Image (tube, grey):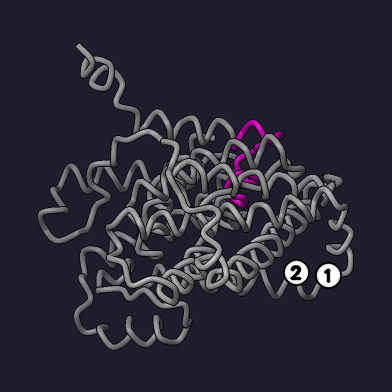
Amino acid sequence: SLTVAVVLLPQAIAYALIAQLPPQTGLFAAIIAGTIGALWGSSFHLHTGPTNTNSLLVLTGLVAVTTADTSTAEYVAIAGVIAFWAGIIRLIMGVAKLGVLVNFVSDSVIIGFTAGAGLLIVDKQLAHLFGVQGVSSPNFFVVLTNVFSQIGQTHLVTFYLGTAGIIALILLRRFAPKLPGPLITMIVGSILVWAFSLNDAGVRVLGEIPRELPRLASIPLFDFLLLRELLPYIIAVALIGLIEASSISRAIASRSGQYLDSDQEFIGQGLANIATGLFSGYPVAGSLTRSAVNYENGAKTQMAAVFSAGWTLLAIDRKSTRLNSSH
């Protein structure tokens, strides 16, 4: 669970930024969805929270329906509306026992979707690997072209550090599969950045984590003019998120041998989105990266995902500073 949390923290912030939302929005979504999606879902290994695909869908919807500045409460509130109503659709589908529809999705579609999700993740991380300026776009080739147009501006220290991390992950998985490779790699990488002050040499670091706990949001849930504009994006987020979660959970279940209850998974995904919408988050789905890390690092039940959300909560908790502010 700690390994997943180490992966989750930077991902939650990065995916929120892809949707042009404040970083704490991603953290709130990670904490709430990671807990509720696990407790009310079916898969032992599926990790629910911010994802690359969902973030791109949300960005597309927000850009289409609002001209509000991305830092305003209105912009964040609309993301919450999408999450809430997408969650309602998923919940209704689960209660109506429509999980059986997943049985009609062929294995080739599952493989294709999983491979496509992997390519999208790689596509989005290339800018960070080469240390160049990224671009927020749902188009695979726009992102790829943007990176390679700046290839001459590659930040070599960043590139060497990232490449060493990839090699370390491969070697650890090959020769020491029982060790938490991602956790070890991130700890060693962090020590190198600190010891040699690589951030002063241009390596971008996560920086201070926003220290704010999830709070109940004021969102226009029944603004029917807004809902009419958002409806296509709400449906897209609801259905694609379900396909994403089902594909990932089925792919892992084929290796773990677990029996999946698709109706219960729909309910879990629905409740996770409803909760994140109400508590200052944004739409969530099953994460391929974190689910794979969860499985490969020995998770046996849904509690592993709950504990990873708990570690994330501890990382952003104000602790005594928050308590002392009332005196």
User: Left of 3 or right of it: where is 174?
Assistant: right
| Farthest residue, direction top | 327
Placement of 251 over or under 9, stated as above or below: below
Residue 305 placed where, x, y %?
59, 37
> Label 2: few (<14), some or many (≥20) within 10 Å?
some
Residue 292: in magenta span: yes
The structure residue drawn at horizontal position 44% and vertical position 77%, both measured from the top left corner, is 64
- Residues 161 and 121: in front is 121
Q: Which amino acid does label 2 sit on?
A: Ile
The structure residue drawn at horizontal position 33% and vertical position 51%, both measured from the top left corner, is 23
Q: How far apart are marks 1 and 2 (CA)?
A: 7 Å
Assign the N terminus to one quadrant of the image. top right
Assign the C terminus to one quadrant of the image. top left
Q: What residue type is labelled 1?
A: Val
Residue annotated with mark 2: 110
The range drawn in magenta is 291-305
Labels 1 and 2: the sequence-earlier one: 1
Res 163 seen here: no
Q: How many labels does the image show?
A: 2
The structure residue drawn at horizontal position 25% and vertical position 63%, both measured from the top left corner, is 158
Res 307 seen here: yes
Residue annotated with mark 1: 105
Q: Is mark 1 on a helix, strand or loop?
A: loop
Placement of 89 over or under 34, stated as above or below: below
Placement of 178 over or under 219, stated as above or below: above
